[in-house]
Image: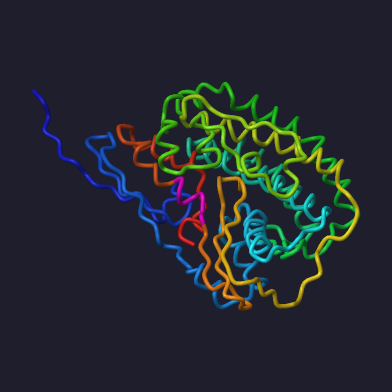
């Protein structure tokens, strides 16, 4: 005899630790099977794009740190690139290389947390996540050496950087770069062929190539679905066109592919860092500009390949000291739009891991 069942709606979040911040999933179940999922956002909204209109172009830089606060330096970078494009401002070569170094250090730091927390969502806390925290702490020590901060940096400036790196920075970075491949090998030994990881991620949370493109996904989420798209290659900025690196892509678009892409990208970031250190020129680190920057009337869109995907700033200038309008293209928000399609037909535990594999930070989802 068939049992009669009725759909039940369950709210997950905004307080649940597996929702990666103040995010709510309104999930409809038939038994244990997910029939529908509605992402509910807005709990963290600060109105940061509106705040840009009441601050000078330079004063807005610290607010960008509060977007993806696990990759704050890249938020700084995307914003100043947009302003420099708007004002046709040149950046000295040394500052460009140092920006690349900071961006790739930030990518490794962000991916360590993306993978570590995703594994944590599966129930494995101590070994993988704490091993990855170990290397992240070394990177935070390097960021602190550069600008005195470990989470929100305010280091980029329009036209360059706030100041040069201290003498002890490059030797410490070289040491980290020489050691990091061995640590990534250690993560692979722990995880890559772990039977629980394979069972929970292979063929689960699939995002097809077509849907990834149609939903405007970017970053490891897009590349995990087999789309070879990276802004560092497609629309090179800074000195990325002078550096050699590969773009890893998945084949299925499942959770495992997104995990694998991030692991390989960390290796490629180490490769980029080695080249940038070797090619780093001497010279100035900032173009001399007026205290109050006044870009000409117009509009500009500056974008970068942030750890989570395409991070872009669209700015309109009316020749004032503050942006007339500012809009942020946040990868965490865009990548979330495909979550429903990735989890319908799965179970609750699969939805938690799938959300973790997207790698969101609510600071840039709600803004």
Residue 334 on the magenta segment? yes
What residue range appears in magenta?
A: 329-335
* Horizontal side of residue 344 vs 119, given as left or right: left
| The residue positioned farthest toward the front in the image shown | 297
* Quadrant in the rendering for residue 276: top right
- Which sits in the foreground, 311 or 177? 311
| Quarter holding residue 163 | bottom right
Q: Examine the residues drawn in magenta and state their main secondary structure.
A: helix
Q: Using the image, determine if residue 295 lies above or below residue 37.
A: below
Colour style of the rendered protein structure: rainbow
State the image coordinates of residue 267 (x, y, percent, origin top left). Answer: 70, 33
- 156 sits to left or right of 280: left
Looking at the rendered structure, the number of numbered marks drawn on it comes to 0
Q: Residue at x 48, y 50 (%)?
A: 20
Q: Residue 333 lies in magenta, yes or no?
A: yes
Q: In terms of depth relative to the viewer, which is nearer, 355 or 240?
A: 240
The residue at 45%/28% (across/down) is 200
**Residue displayed at 77% across by 53% down:** 96
Most foreground residue, 133 or 57: 57
Q: Position of residue 198 (x, y in %)?
A: 50, 24
Q: Is 15 situated above or below 48?
A: above
Q: Nearer the viewer, residue 51 or 327?
A: 327
Q: Residue 331, percent across and down?
A: 51, 49
Q: Quadrant of the N terminus?
A: top left
| Residue farthest along the left direction in this orientation | 1
Residue 146 at what x, y percent from top left?
80, 58
Q: Is residue 355 above or below residue 316?
A: above
């Amino acid at each position: 005899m068939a049992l009669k069942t009725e759909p039940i709606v369950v709210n997950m979040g905004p307080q649940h630790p597996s929702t990666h911040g103040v995010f709510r999933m309104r999930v409809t179940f038939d038994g244990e099977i997910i029939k529908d999922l509605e992402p509910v956002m807005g709990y963290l909204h600060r109105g940061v794009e509106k705040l840009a209109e009441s601050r000078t172009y330079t004063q807005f830089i610290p607010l960008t740190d509060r977007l993806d606060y696990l990759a704050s330096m890249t938020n700084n970078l995307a914003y100043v690139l947009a302003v420099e494009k708007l004002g046709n401002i040149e950046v000295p070569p040394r500052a460009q290389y140092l920006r690349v170094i900071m961006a790739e250090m930030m990518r490794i730091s962000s991916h360590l947390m993306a993978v570590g927390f995703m594994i944590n969502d599966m129930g494995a806390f101590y070994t993988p996540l704490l091993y990855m925290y170990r290397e992240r702490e070394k990177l935070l020590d390097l960021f602190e050496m550069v600008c005195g901060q470990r989470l929100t940096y305010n280091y980029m400036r329009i036209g360059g950087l706030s100041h040069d790196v201290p003498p002890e920075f490059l030797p410490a970075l070289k040491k980290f770069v020489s050691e990091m491949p061995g640590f990534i090998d250690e993560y692979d030994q722990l995880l890559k062929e772990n039977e629980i990881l394979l069972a929970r991620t292979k063929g689960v949370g699939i995002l097809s190539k077509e849907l990834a493109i149609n939903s405007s996904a970017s970053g490891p989420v897009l590349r995990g679905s087999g789309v070879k798209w990276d802004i560092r290659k497609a629309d090179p900025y800074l000195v990325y066109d002078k550096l050699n690196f590969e773009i890893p892509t998945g084949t299925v678009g499942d959770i495992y592919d997104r995990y694998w892409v991030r692991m390989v990208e960390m290796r490629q970031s180490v490769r980029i860092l080695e080249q940038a250190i070797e090619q780093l020129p001497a010279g100035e680190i900032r173009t001399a500009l007026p205290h109050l920057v006044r870009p000409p009337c117009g509009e500009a869109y500056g974008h970068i390949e942030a750890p989570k995907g395409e991070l872009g700033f669209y700015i309109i200038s009316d020749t004032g000291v503050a942006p007339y309008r500012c809009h942020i293209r946040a990868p965490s928000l865009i990548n979330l739009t495909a979550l429903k399609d990735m989890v319908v037909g799965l179970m609750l535990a699969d939805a938690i891991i799938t959300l973790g594999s997207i790698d969101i930070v609510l600071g840039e989802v709600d803004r």
